[in-house]
Image (tube, rainbow, N blue to C red):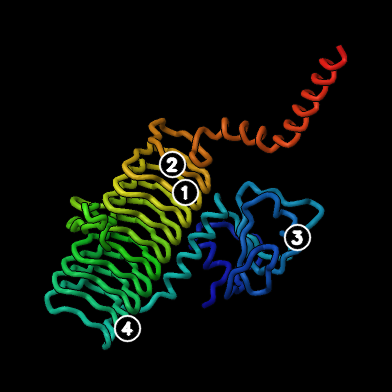
Amino acid sequence: MEFTAQEIADLIKGTIEGRPDVVVHDVSKIEDGRPGTLSFLANPKYTHYLYSTQASVVIINNDFNLNGDKNPDTTLIRTPDAYSAFAKLLATYNKRREPQAGIADTSIVSAKAQIGKDVYIGEYVVIEEGAIIGDGVQLYPHTYIGQDTSIGNGTKLYIGVKIYHDCHIGQNCTIHAGTVIGSDGFGFAPQQEQDYKKIPQIGNVIIEDNVEIGTNCTIDRATMGSTLIRKGVKLDNLIQVAHNVYIGENTVIAAQSGISGSSSIGSNCMLGGQVGIAGHLEIADEVKIGAQSGISNHIREKGATVLGSPAYDISAFKRAFTYFRNLPKIVKRIDWLEKKLKDQQENK
């Protein structure tokens, strides 16, 4: 797939400095630029690469000032935000690569399912009765859609995604390969015989619009009611969301994090990788949790930043860690002082 500099500038509403007819057919990092590729410069620490890159076209910010003694040997496109413009181009590129609408012969679609317009249903997809598939939905091969589940307009489910019965996925969501939504929550009641009785999980999962979920995530259905993920949430790969969890709007969670049952996370929160949250906890809006933190208590302060396991205020954690790092020196100093004191007492 090829684009001219002029086509790129038109798409991102940019201004060209150089050849408008130069053609690119791939993208590259500015430090690894090759002829025929498109790159961008947004981080000032990469500025020097602009004067050596072999990329044919580079997107820069409007306010970027060129070095008067050097002229980049590339076509430049100025735009208010180079990073956002480049992201927009990548999205356009991906969209052109998407499969065309159509239903594969090997798919199994119930006659009692409702299928929208311009839908792509790949090889070996299974759609059960009562399911509702919105307009423009893309279901990649080996996807499973359970009974009475709905998928909103424009949503993409990649290879091997499994959505159990009675779940509801919003519009323009992206769910990556291997993710399972709506499996049973981890509910077992201890018995006198020291075994466990399974508690039926009769709720569902509701995912609102514009949510993106990475590969191999698991989102459990509620025991009763709904496991609820609000609009704009972004989940990385390998994340566990347990039964009856609530995640507020535009919260982002990095890979390998786990959220125990019935916990509630506010809006606009940021969780680092491998964060663990115990059950039945409340996390306020705009909270930031550092990687590998363990949350065992409520965080009710809006905008708090915590770190550690158990996690606490990041400023206090950093002070404590400074002492911990110097602990061998402190112990050595205490030993010396104790010996000094003992010697003084013996010489009296």
How many marks the image carries: the answer is 4
Q: Secondary structure at mark 2?
A: strand
Residue 254's x, y, as percent?
Answer: 47, 53
Q: Of tags 4 and 2, which is closer to the observer?
A: 2
Residue at screen point 27% across, 87% down: 106
The residue identified by callout 2 is 295
Q: Of tags 1 and 4, which is closer to the observer?
A: 1
Residue 251's x, y, as percent?
Answer: 40, 47
The residue identified by callout 1 is 275
Residue at screen point 23% across, 60% down: 168
Q: Earlier in the sequence, mark 4 or mark 2?
A: 4
Residue reaching furthest to the right? 347
Rendered view: 187 above or below 104: above
The residue identified by callout 3 is 51
Name the kind of residue labelled 2 in the image.
Ile
Q: Is residue 68 something that shows in the picture? A: yes
Crowd rating for badge 4 (residues with CA inside 10 Å; few <14, some 14–19, many 20+) = some
Q: Quadrant of residue 58?
A: bottom right
* Foreground pick, 214 / 73: 214
Q: Of tags 2 and 3, which is closer to the observer?
A: 2
Q: State if disc 1 and disc 3 touch (CB < 8 Å).
A: no
Q: Earlier in the sequence, mark 2 or mark 1?
A: 1
Name the kind of residue labelled 4 in the image.
Glu
